[in-house]
Image (cartoon, rainbow, N blue to C red):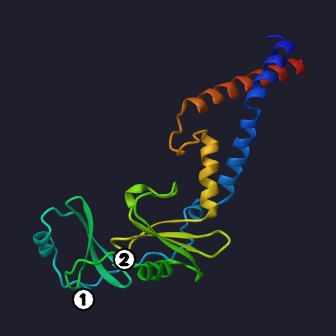
Amino acid sequence: VSANSARKWHKWLMAIVGIQFFIWSLTGLYMVLFNIHFIHGETLVTPANSTLTSTTINHEFSTIYQQYPEVKNLTLITVLNKTVYRFSSAGKLVAVDAATGVELNKLSKTRAIAIAKQHLATPLMVKSAKLLNKQAPSELSARHLPVWRIEFDSLASPTLYISHTTGELVTKRHHYWRVFDWFWRFHIMDYDDGENVANWFLLLIALIAVLAAISGTILSYRRLI
């Protein structure tokens, strides 16, 4: 391959992938600059207290199975210092007070805010609290609905999602995560939901990038000799 041919091929191939090279560099830099645990919002909340005592459990497992014959995925959780049975039955999520055996009412706005504040690592003012019933935002899986979306007043806009049924912290988000999510989509060239890392567009551009690198290598070799 002559130097002129290598130069021509390299010029046109880089014209196609040059912008994507810049996007890969920019998005990759952002993703390596920030600790992934920070991006996941782990620093937003206090570590979960998994300690349970028998004194808070007066309602036995066997009784739960008698009351709800279709129980699946039965677990014990702590909500506002109260021990709660969490499980699914007949296709719906159920929460039962482990001390009294009474099924809990749906979470009120006041209690949802209290739970969110209890989870938050740094005290902040609540900016908004909204119940999401039917449509989940792109940053939340629809399987968690219904949830309370509690947003706090801060530069990063930390947001906690609290289950309307059980009072559990479903997930946490902030602006750094949202930027990371969009950068990830641009990085893998999946602009829909960012889940397909083997999409044809990425494979095509990657192939062209490899050809551009090969032509550039040939051009450099020709110039050196």
Horizontal side, residue 85 vs residue 59: left or right: right
Q: Secondary structure at mark 1?
A: helix
Judging by the rendered image, the residue that carries numbered circle 2 is 107
Q: Secondary structure at mark 2?
A: loop
In the displayed structure, 19 sits above or below 8; it is: below
- Residue name at image x 23 percent, y 81 percent: 98
> x and y percent of residue 33 in the render?
69, 57
| Residue type at numbered disc 1 | Thr
> x and y percent of residue 113 in the render?
47, 80
Q: Residue furthest top?
A: 1
Choose top left, top right, bottom left or bottom right for residue 159: bottom right
Judging by the rendered image, the residue that carries numbered circle 1 is 55
The label shown at residue 25 is none
Is residue 35 visible in this depiction of the protein?
Answer: no
Horizontal side, residue 15 vs residue 176: left or right: right
The quarter in which the C terminus is drawn is top right
| Residue type at numbered disc 2 | Leu
> x and y percent of residue 31 in the render?
65, 53
- Closest to the observer, 66 or 24: 66
The quarter in which the N terminus is drawn is top right
In the displayed structure, 163 sits above or below 215; it is: below
In the displayed structure, 3 sits above or below 154; it is: above
- Residue name at image x 75 percent, y 36 percent: 19
- Residue name at image x 23 percent, y 85 percent: 99
Rounded to the nearest whole Å, what is the CA distance between mark 1 and mark 2? Answer: 24 Å
Horizontal side, residue 107 vs residue 20: left or right: left
Horizontal side, residue 107 vs residue 184: left or right: left
